[in-house]
Amino acid sequence: MTLTLDDARRMEECIAGGGVAVFPSDTVYGIGCEPDNQTAVERLYALKGRPPARPAAVMFFSLQVALSALPELGRHERAALCALLPGPLTLLLPNRARRFEPACAADLDTLGVRVPLLPRSAAALGVVEVPVMQSSANISGESEARRFADIPAALREGVDLALDGGELPGTASTVLDLRTFEQRQEWTIARAGPVSAEEVNETLGSLHIQP
C-alpha cells in the first residue's frame, strides 16, 4: 500500500484540525495528534491506555521543518540533528523554550524529537509540515504494530484517520539522550533500537563544528 499526496494532505488537515491519526513511519505504526492541543493529547492517551504523565516525542516529517521549528537549538545540537536525521531515532533535547508542553507531560525540560526516514510506501508524508505528537499505535504495554492489521481495532476505529503504509521494519526507534551534548558533547542510549551505539559514536565523532 503506497500513500499518496492526497493522503498526506488529509493527515495534515486531520492533525491541524485537532484530530488523531494512525500512520506509518520508518519503524512501526504511530498514532499522533497536534502536540499543543491538550484535548487531542488526552484523547490519544485514552485510546492507548497510556499514563498521562508519560511524555511523547514530537515528529517532524522533514529535517528543515524541525530545524525551523526549534531555533533555540545550539550549534552542537543542530549539527547532531543534521548528521543523525532523518532516521529511526528519537533525540532527547533540552526544551529551553518549553515548547509542546502537552506532549512533554511531566518533564517540561525535555523534548523528544523524531524525523523519520520514510520508506517509499510512505514517502508522500514528507510534505506534511505540521508537527505531530506521536506514540506507537498499540495499547500501552503491548507489542508495536509492524503491519496495519496488527494495530488494535479499538485504535483503528477510534481515530479520525488511519493510513495503511504496508509492512514496516517493526523495531521501535533508538532513543538517544543529547541533553548534555551542547555543553559537553556527551550522549547516552536511553533505549536500544535500529541505530546502535557504535553507529551513533561514529556519526557524532565525525562532526566538525565551526566555532
Image (spheres, rainbow, N blue to C red):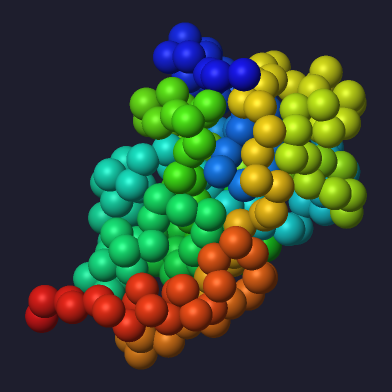
Image position, residue 40 (x, y; %): 66, 31
User: Where 124 sits versus 77, above or below?
Assistant: above
User: Quarter of the image containing the C terminus?
Assistant: bottom left
- Is any atom of residue 35 visible in this view? no
Which residue does the image show at 38% across and 62% down from the upper left?
Answer: 84
Which residue does the image show at 40% across and 31% down from the upper left?
Answer: 126
Toward the bottom, the furthest residue is 184
- Is any atom of residue 132 visible in this view? yes
Q: Nearer the viewer, residue 43 or 165?
A: 165
Give the quadrant of residue 72.
Answer: bottom left
User: Where 9 sits versus 193, above or below?
Assistant: above
Q: Nearer the viewer, residue 149 or 188?
A: 149
Image position, residue 53 (x, y; %): 75, 58
Give the quadrant of residue 104.
Answer: bottom right
User: Quarter of the image containing the N terminus?
Assistant: top right
Which residue does the image show at 40% across and 50% down from the upper left?
Answer: 86
Image position, residue 44 (x, y; %): 74, 35
State how many labels appear: 0
Which residue does the image show at 58% across and 77% down from the upper left?
Answer: 189
Give the quadrant of residue 38.
Answer: top right
Name the side, left or right, on which 78 lies relative to 148: left
User: Where 79 sits versus 162, above or below?
Assistant: below
Name the side, left or right, on which 115 lies relative to 63: right
Toward the left, the furthest residue is 211
